[in-house]
């Protein structure tokens, strides 16, 4: 069992607090993604779990054992870095075997593990080559194979695909998901790329300002963001937000549209809707088209609603030109509401 428990972990660098009392449990064999913009604390948290940084406060437990005072080699982990960290003076075989030799495993066991993991990562034909003879994608496969060969309880990955081109990232993403599912390890994966996070994760922990804002399944994070930040960070394009005010009829008025809001909510709220949850129909939000971007199957329309930018993803067959007046109707079950003072989500109307 390799359940990971982060209990009240904080980290300060002088007067700067990088992490604010993080509490997080990652189940055995779960694929957890730490997602956030640069500087949000995700890599600091990963390094604390790895033992490369010491927490200022709090505890780290792996497999029911407290490890925050143990050196990295005693934590049962393997790590894959952004810059590959492949030794240039060693062959692919020796790179994969490096950690196994450090553990003084017998040569037949080393050979078995190296060849098995090389086959998993489709690099068995490269075992005699040096890293200088490899492409970036091949070097990253070597780094992952080296980690898997250790048969760790936990694999930690710090933006391992960020140096690859878009097509290779797509290929490696699918490969990683399959390989790590079969390896039955617990995985923590750090990225700022929301597409990576959505496609790989069992759960996503969205981080901002040294805090976990929401930890949930990719679908839950996307459909029901717990805070305004999550809605604005997840999604490309992100959620639209408009001010809403309750009128005498008890309904919320949003740019001329009257909607039923959450029961018992404050006088002023924020209305939110994803761009793909809008359709052109009578009786909607009054919009003026400003920028039209054809995207193949869909068209992204950036419009102006009540003086604010407002985006809609519409069918590519719809003909729209800049300056056209539009009526954009939101899907009722996809509307979300936020408290403008706390930025927290409110319960959706049934």
Image (cartoon, rainbow, N blue to C red):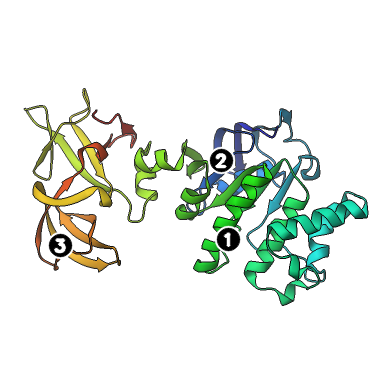
Q: Pick whichever, 16 or 232, lies toward us.
A: 232
Residue 240 shows in the view? yes
Helix, strand or loop status at disc 2 = strand
Q: Nearer the viewer, mark 2 or mark 1?
A: 1
> Picture quarter containing residue 272?
top left
Instruction: Identify the residue at the far bottom of this view.
Output: 133
Q: For label 1, count other residues whose C-alpha is less than 10 Å away and answer few (under 14), some (14-19) or many (20+).
A: some
| First-in-chain label (2 vs 3) | 2
Label 3 to label 1, Cα distance in Å? 38 Å
Name the one closer to the observer, 299 or 237: 299
Is residue 13 something one can see in this rendering?
no
What residue sits right under mark 2 in the picture? 19
In front: mark 2 or mark 3? 3
Residue 289 badge:
3
Which residue is at 78% across, 66% downward?
92
CB contact under 8 Å: marks 3 and 1:
no
Is residue 152 positioned above or below 320 on the image?
above
Q: Name the residue tied to disc 1.
A: 172
Residue at 73% x, 77% y is 133
Q: Nearer the viewer, residue 261 or 106?
A: 106
**In the visual, does 214 lie left or right of 271?**
right
User: The residue tagged with tag 3: helix, strand or loop?
Assistant: strand
On the rendered structure, is 171 left or right of 73?
A: left
Which-is-in-front pick, marks 3 and 1?
1
Q: Quadrant of residue 90?
A: bottom right
- Quadrant where the image shows the C terminus: top left
């Amino acid at each position: 069992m390799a359940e990971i428990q982060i209990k009240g972990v904080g980290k300060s660098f002088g007067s700067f607090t990088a992490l604010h009392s993080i509490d997080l449990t990652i189940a055995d064999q779960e694929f957890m993604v730490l997602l956030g913009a640069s500087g949000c604390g995700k890599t600091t948290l990963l390094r604390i779990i790895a033992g490369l940084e010491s927490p200022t406060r709090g505890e780290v437990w792996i497999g029911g054992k407290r490890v925050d005072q143990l050196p990295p080699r005693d934590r049962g982990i393997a790590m894959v870095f952004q810059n590959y960290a492949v030794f240039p003076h060693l062959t692919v075989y020796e790179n994969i075997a490096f950690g196994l030799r450090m553990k003084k495993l017998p040569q037949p066991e080393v050979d078995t593990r190296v060849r098995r993991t090389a086959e998993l990562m489709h690099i068995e034909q490269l075992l005699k080559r040096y890293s200088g003879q490899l492409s970036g994608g091949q070097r990253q496969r070597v780094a992952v194979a080296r980690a898997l060969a250790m048969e760790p309880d936990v694999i930690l990955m710090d933006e391992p695909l960020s140096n690859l081109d878009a097509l290779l990232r797509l290929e490696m993403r699918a490969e990683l998901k399959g390989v790590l599912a079969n390896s039955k390890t617990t995985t923590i994966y750090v990225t700022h790329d929301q597409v990576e996070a959505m496609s790989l994760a069992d759960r996503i922990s969205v981080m901002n300002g040294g805090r976990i804002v929401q930890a949930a399944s990719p679908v839950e994070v996307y459909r029901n963001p717990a805070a305004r930040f999550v809605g604005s960070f997840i999604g490309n394009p992100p959620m639209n937000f408009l001010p809403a005010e309750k009128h005498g009829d008890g309904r919320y008025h949003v740019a001329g549209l009257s909607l039923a809001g959450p029961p018992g909510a404050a006088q002023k709220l924020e209305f939110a809707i994803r761009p793909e949850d809008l359709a052109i129909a009578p009786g909607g939000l009054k919009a003026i088209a400003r920028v039209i971007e054809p995207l193949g199957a869909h068209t992204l329309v950036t419009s102006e609603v009540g003086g604010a930018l407002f985006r809609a993803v519409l069918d590519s067959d719809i003909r729209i030109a800049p300056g056209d007046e539009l009526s954009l109707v939101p899907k009722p079950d996809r509307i979300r509401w936020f408290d403008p003072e706390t930025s927290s989500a409110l319960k959706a109307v049934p």
